[in-house]
Amino acid sequence: MTLDLRERLHRLEEEGNRLREELYTTVEVGGRRISLYNAGMKGGSVWFGPFGRDLLMTALILGEPEFAQAALRFAAETIGRKFDPKTGEEPGRGLHEFNRVEIRGLFTHYNAVEVSLLFLITADLYLREGGNAAFIDSIRLPLEAALDYLSRHVEDGLFVEDPHYCGATRYALRATYWKDSHLPGREDPDYPVIYTLVQAQAIAAVRAAARLRSYIRVPFEEARMEEKLLDRLVSTLWNHRANRPYIALDQTGKIDGVSSDALHLLFYLCPGDLSPDRLAGIEENAHHLATPVGYRTYAPGQLGYSPRAYHLGAIWPMEQYFIARGAAQHKLFEISKAALGTVAALERLGFVELYYWDEETGVRGPSRNGGDGCDLQLWSTAVPTGLVSAFETHED
């Protein structure tokens, strides 16, 4: 990283830390007041309240024990305890959206498949970064519930998402991993569905749970589960002809495409999990997603693509961190450097939820008065801190 780029990132980091405080809030859960952050603002007003996924992923980006502890406390206090087909709740399933939002006659509260996995991953990172062991022991039961949830959803080596687990036939949202607007070519998945990015997160969560063994006392065969999950990722969930991961697999078939999921999942895998040939395939497909300001969520020319599509074309600053860090872990440094294009976009647009790249008009952010995307997003404020850490750790 050049001195100029480092200085630019530090300036952005200071601004991100300052603006993050505009998202500060407190909520009451189970009789306990928890201080944390809303997910996003638009036009000076809160647009998205607290989200489990956003808080935990921001904790992974920041690597700050104090922030992580608040996110973990929120996840622990709100973890699912019953089966509810209206909200998607099931025991051990992490909360998606704290506020009451109704879509299609259902509620979004537990419409995120991976929050429990992120809960385990973040708890492990918190401890490894010097966090308080007594605090982790205090949330042991929710962590055990999250591990039970993980184990329940693994079927023959695949991490399966299905509303039948909570007694429903569908969720309020049309997809339940972070790209939750919809999948290419699907109104709703033909459940059960396996999201390839979530499969990688499940591998990381199993490894995290194994390292948390002295706190989590639920019996599980971590080595066998890890091996089977990884094997199915590189066999069943891999397009061997195009040499890239599928986006998902449901009962209708394989959902294929050049997606940022293939880059994002590297963050959750360890060096050696993917062969050099598979890494080369990811690197080759990355060219179709690249812009001067980072990687699109989805490549041009594909079914449903638009440069302004929320999850099928737009560029998310948050994801540039996970791409940069994950690629560096696997020594794909050209991918990491391309993700740094987000720095110029953040300098121009601020800490927006997402932005767009057009060859004629360049980079543009979301409208303050309409359209998709917040003009201040929690996890975007953390990106400069995360990028500084990523490149100090993996300087080539």
Image (tube, helix red, strand yellow):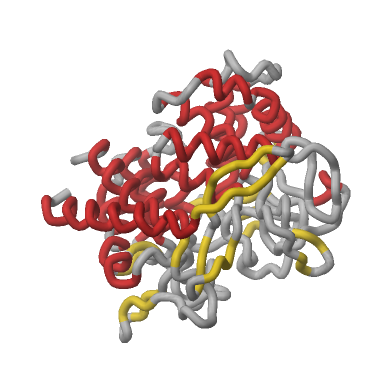
- The answer to which of 117 and 194 lies nearer the viewer is 117
Image point (58%, 32%), residue name: 120
Q: Is residue 267 left or right of residue 87?
A: left
Check the picture and name the quadrant holding the C terminus.
top left
Residue 72, position in %: x, y?
Answer: 57, 36
Give the quarter of the image for residue 8: bottom left
Total number of numbered labels? 0
Farthest-out residue, right:
167
Image height of 385 relative to 371, above or below: above
Farthest-out residue, bottom:
360
Q: Can you see residue 238?
A: no
Q: Is residue 82 left or right of residue 186?
A: right
Residue 111, position in %: x, y?
Answer: 71, 54
Image point (32%, 85%), residue name: 361
- The answer to which of 119 and 174 lies nearer the viewer is 119
Residue 23, position in %: x, y?
Answer: 49, 57
Image point (70%, 64%), residue name: 174
Image height of 19 relative to 333, above or below: below
- The answer to which of 324 and 278 lies nearer the viewer is 324
Residue 92, position in %: x, y?
Answer: 73, 36
Farthest-out residue, top:
214
Q: Is residue 279 left or right of residue 168?
A: left
